[in-house]
Image (spheres, rainbow, N blue to C red):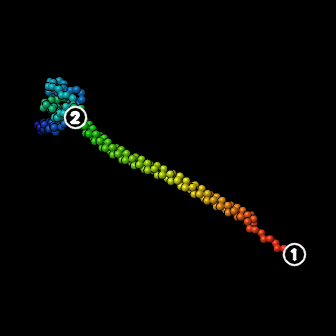
């Protein structure tokens, strides 16, 4: 019975590292951490792992608080579990952020270019509209001037017509006065021109 229990424990211990194998973890951003040959600080230091380094988790010893990893240089060892994180470190995040920033800048530049093109088109359209408005205003002013000149000419013509009417009326009055005066004068002069007949003396006294 003890043999079976020991065998089960041995199998579980062998399976546990396999279950934890090939899990990606990152060393937290704390400059660096030491790598030990065993799960504890009492074990020999075999190197250090820089902050943000991508590592592979092999197994964990919760009782000791240490995690067995393989670093980016292929070295295997134990580090303090508090320095092992699921979050990507700055070492990995910075290039991704730079790539994202480059993409954002490219999109922004494209948007600005498109906006500049649209603004240029709007400016050209506005300039054309302003030119058309100026032309219409010029034509309107010209028509107003021509209309004013025509109205002045019409008033002058009407004034001339009225003056001619008055002159004609005065002429008729003058002619009428002359005719009447001539008739009157003729009536006064005519008796003196025609000799009177002398009365015959027939004996009637």
Considering depth in this image, is 52 or 13 the residue closer to the camera? 52
Q: Quadrant of the N terminus?
A: top left
User: Residue shown at 51%/51% (left/top)?
Assistant: 148
Q: Residue 157, which numbered label?
A: none
- SS category of the residue bearing label 2: helix
Above or below, 174 against 104 in this view is below
- Asked whether, in this view, residue 187 is left or right of residue 149, the answer is right
User: Residue shown at 50%/53% (left/top)?
Assistant: 150
Mark 1 lies on residue: 204
| Residue 58 visible, this angle | yes
Q: Nearer the viewer, mark 2 or mark 1?
A: 1
Quadrant in the rendering for residue 80: top left
User: Residue shown at 55%/55% (left/top)?
Assistant: 157
Residue 171 coordinates in the image, percent (x, y): 63, 59
Mark 2 lies on residue: 95
**Alpha-carbon neighbours of circle 2 within 10 Å: few (<14), some, or many (≥20)?**
few
Residue 77 coordinates in the image, percent (x, y): 15, 29
Considering depth in this image, is 116 or 29 the residue closer to the camera? 116
Quadrant in the rendering for residue 196: bottom right
């Amino acid at each position: 019975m003890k043999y079976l229990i020991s065998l089960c424990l041995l199998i579980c211990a062998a399976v546990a590292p396999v279950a934890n194998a090939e899990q990606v973890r990152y060393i937290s951003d704390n400059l660096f951490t030491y790598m030990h040959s065993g799960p504890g600080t009492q074990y020999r230091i075999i190197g250090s792992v820089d902050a943000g380094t991508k590592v592979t988790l092999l197994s964990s010893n919760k009782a000791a608080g240490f995690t067995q990893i393989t670093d980016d240089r292929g070295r295997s060892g134990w580090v303090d579990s508090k320095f092992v994180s699921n979050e990507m470190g700055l070492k990995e995040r910075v290039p991704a952020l730079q790539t994202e920033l480059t993409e954002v800048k490219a999109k922004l530049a494209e948007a600005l270019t498109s906006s500049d093109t649209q603004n240029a088109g709007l400016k050209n359209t506005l300039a054309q509209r302003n030119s058309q408005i100026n032309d219409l205003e010029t034509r309107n002013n010209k028509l107003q001037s021509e209309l004013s000149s025509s109205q002045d000419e019409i008033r002058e013509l009407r004034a001339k017509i009225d003056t001619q009417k008055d002159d004609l009326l005065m002429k008729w009055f003058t002619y009428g006065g002359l005719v009447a005066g001539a008739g009157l004068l003729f009536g006064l002069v005519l008796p003196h021109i025609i000799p009177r007949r002398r009365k015959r003396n027939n004996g009637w006294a």
